Image (cartoon, helix red, strand yellow):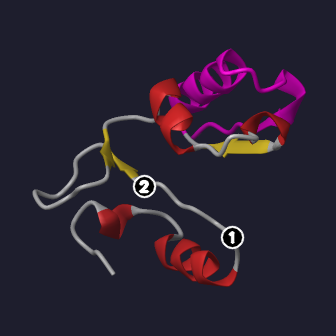
């Protein structure tokens, strides 16, 4: 298991790693500030990243997006731009008060 300062801040890391072992699940971690030895995706999720990692039949899936508003806006736009029907993209929006 890879751990480091950036990975220690990932929410539900252990639970996602457990789910990967129990079901057909691929998790792609995207780190804004990765450790020096990180070989995974970096920066922010983009349409190009989605295109790279989504399976061929991705347009038929349902997508559930939760996170900061700018990231959610970008993912909604990217998914719809890739041809995912807008009604397949579900978001949970919240704001800190």
Where the C terminus falls, by quadrant? top right
The answer to if 6 sits in the magenta stretch is: no
Q: Say which quarter of the image contains residue 75.
A: top right
Residue interval drawn in magenta: 68-96
| Residue 8 placement, left or right of 26 | left
Which residue is outermost to the right? 87
Residue 40 higher or lower than 14, as above or below? above
Residue tagged 2: 29
Secondary structure of the residue carrying numbered label 1: loop
Q: Residues within 10 Å of mark 2 (few under 14, many from 20)?
A: few
Of label 1 and label 2, which has the lower sequence position? Answer: 1
Q: Say which quarter of the image contains residue 4.
A: bottom left
Give the distance between the C-alpha atoms of the residues marked 1 and 2, in whole angstroms. 16 Å
The answer to if 69 sits in the magenta stretch is: yes
Which residue is outermost to the front? 56
- Residue at 48%, 71% (x, y): give it: 13
| Residue 22 placement, left or right of 49 | right
Residue 97 higher or lower than 2, as above or below? above
Residue 77's x, y, as percent? 64, 18
What label sits on residue 24 in the rendered view?
1
| Residue 38 placement, left or right of 83 | left
| Residue 75 placement, left or right of 34 | right
- Residue at 60%, 22% (x, y): give it: 78
């Amino acid at each position: 298991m890879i751990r480091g300062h950036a990975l220690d801040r990932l929410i539900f890391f252990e639970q996602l790693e457990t789910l990967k072992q129990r079901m057909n699940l691929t998790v792609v971690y995207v780190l804004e500030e990765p450790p020096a030895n990180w070989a995974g995706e970096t920066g922010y999720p983009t349409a190009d990243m989605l295109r790279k990692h989504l399976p061929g039949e991705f347009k038929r899936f349902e997508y559930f997006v939760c996170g900061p508003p700018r990231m959610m806006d970008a993912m909604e736009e990217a998914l719809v731009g890739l041809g995912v029907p807008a009604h397949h993209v579900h978001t949970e929006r919240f704001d800190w008060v």
